[in-house]
Image: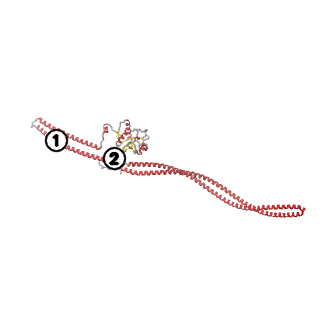
Amino acid sequence: MRQNLPITQNEYPIPDGSAIISHTDLKGHITYCNDEFIAASGFSRSEVIGQPHNILRHPDMPPEAYRDMWSTLERGLPWSGIVKNRRKNGDFYWVKATATPLADQSGYMSVRVKAGRSEIAAADALYGRMRTDPGIRLEQGQLAPTGVLAALGRFLPHPSLKARIYLISGGLTALNVIVAAVGLNATDHSRNAYSNAVRDESRLIQQLALPPDDPVRASLQRHAEASQGALQRIEAEDASTRQWLIGLGLSGLLLAAIATVQLIRRLGHSVDAGKRVAEAIAKGNMLEPLPPASNDELGALIIHLAVMRNNLHELVASIRNQVNALLGNARELSSTASDTRVLADAQAESASGMAAAIEQLSVSIDHISEHARESRELSETSGERAATGSRVISHAVSEMRAIADSVNLTAGSVRNLESLSGEISMIVGVIREIADQTNLLALNAAIEAARAGESGRGFAVVADEVRKLAERTANSTAEITTMIERIQSATRHAADDMDEGVKGAARGVTLADEAGGTIGSIQESSSQVLGSVEGITLGLTEQSAAARDIAQRVEQIAGASESNAASAARITQSAEQLEELARTLETLSSRFRIA
């Protein structure tokens, strides 16, 4: 026998109302089990399907219990008993098991429910005795009776109910015949005894040898004649009674036989009809016609079978209708759960991507905020520099105005210089004329000295020197004239440039004023920009905090989406299990023929 080890002393409690169901093939291999079976055994479904049923056998169970169970089932009989099974981890649990052959004879079915504590105690004590005494036997889960009659009962055939009725009827008929025979025999014996007594009395009277006229003889003779008449009457009545008894006996036998046959036919018809209906119900056929119910116990059995069949019919029809809806709902739920899982995965992925994007946005906002702070600092610096530039431009405007004034003064001086150059040119012209006159006079003096001869030689030298001086003066005046012309030309150009400079200075002053105004505007704008940058910085700080909060919420959404995906996966698994359950119910309900 298979030994499943190890074992523990921990009992697994079977929940109230739990029904542990399994099917096996004819060789005892598990072909089906429900969820309660899986929960109680501790095995997974894949670990038990296809395995021998003794995978649950506990070492404390005696081999006789399983021998009796399989022997009973192989004879097509139901078996019921208290069983101790072993769980996968070595724990144990007690159940009240009822095993029957399947309706299609393809295997066996076992239904187990929670056993009571008194039943467990009695079974545990019995199995303990059986482990020490291998001679203890079980029959259909119960302790087998002992003794000669019990031993004979195991080997004698078990007649059917019809045969038992025939045997009982035949026995009663035989008993009636025996009683009638005994009665007839007793009547014959009484009649013979009375007849012998009368004959003995007649012989005794004859042997007395009394005189014919003796009154005693006459009295005895009358008594003998009366006895003889009574004997004749008794014999006549006995013959009539015998005929009546024989007639009544034969009539009783005939009536008993007829009644027995009718009773057997009636009982047989009712029993066969009830058996046929019960077999049809056991095979799942709810369409077998019911016989009329009689007003007796068999009629009550037919009524109860009809009620049971109607209840089963209603139950199976309801199960079939619900199974179709359940199967459709399970498929829809499975499809919806799959779609939900896909959407949840996509949502989780999108949420994760969104969280990453928001995190990058938060980082970008931090960078922008940092840049905004730098811009604010630059704006402050620009404002300060604009203020400084405004002051510098104001000072430059003042300086340019002073320069313009100086240029105007210089232009006036240049114009005065031009005027003086003209006067100098006039003086140089006079000097040139004087030089020309002097040169002419020197020439004349030289001519006169030449005329004077030797006495005029000294004067000629002087005249020559005067001529040379006049030439040099003429040359100098020419140079001075050229120089004055250049000075006048330069002065005119300088004056023109001075005019342009004055105009440029005026334009510079105007532009400087405009620049000052622009710088003032820039300063004002810088102040506004600074305020805006501060507002932007504050807004960016708030947006950064909001972005982080959104990122956290998106992460929570991503976590929730992942949880939803996991829940959708569990729902998908549950839907698959529900669909499998619906198919199982459909398979089970298909065993019943209701239409």
The image quadrant of residue 211 is: top left
Q: Is residue 543 above or below residue 117?
A: below
Residue 85 visible in the displayed image: no
**Label 1 CA crowd tier, 10 Å (few <14, some 14–19, many 20+):** some
Q: Position of residue 159 (x, y in %)?
A: 29, 42
* Closest to the observer, 227 or 564: 564
**Residue 528 higher or lower than 181, as above or below:** below
Quarter holding the N terminus is: top left
Q: Identify the image quadrant of residue 451.
A: bottom right
- Residue ID at (43%, 51%): 331
Residue 580: x and y in percent read 42, 48
Cα–Cα gap, marks 2 and 1:
62 Å
- The circle on residue 235 is 1
Name the residue that disc number 2 marks: 279
Q: Report the coloring of the rendering.
A: secondary structure
For residue 538, side relative to residue 171 (left or right): right
Between disc 2 and disc 1, whose residue precedes?
1
Answer whether residue 407 is visible to the viewer in this image: yes
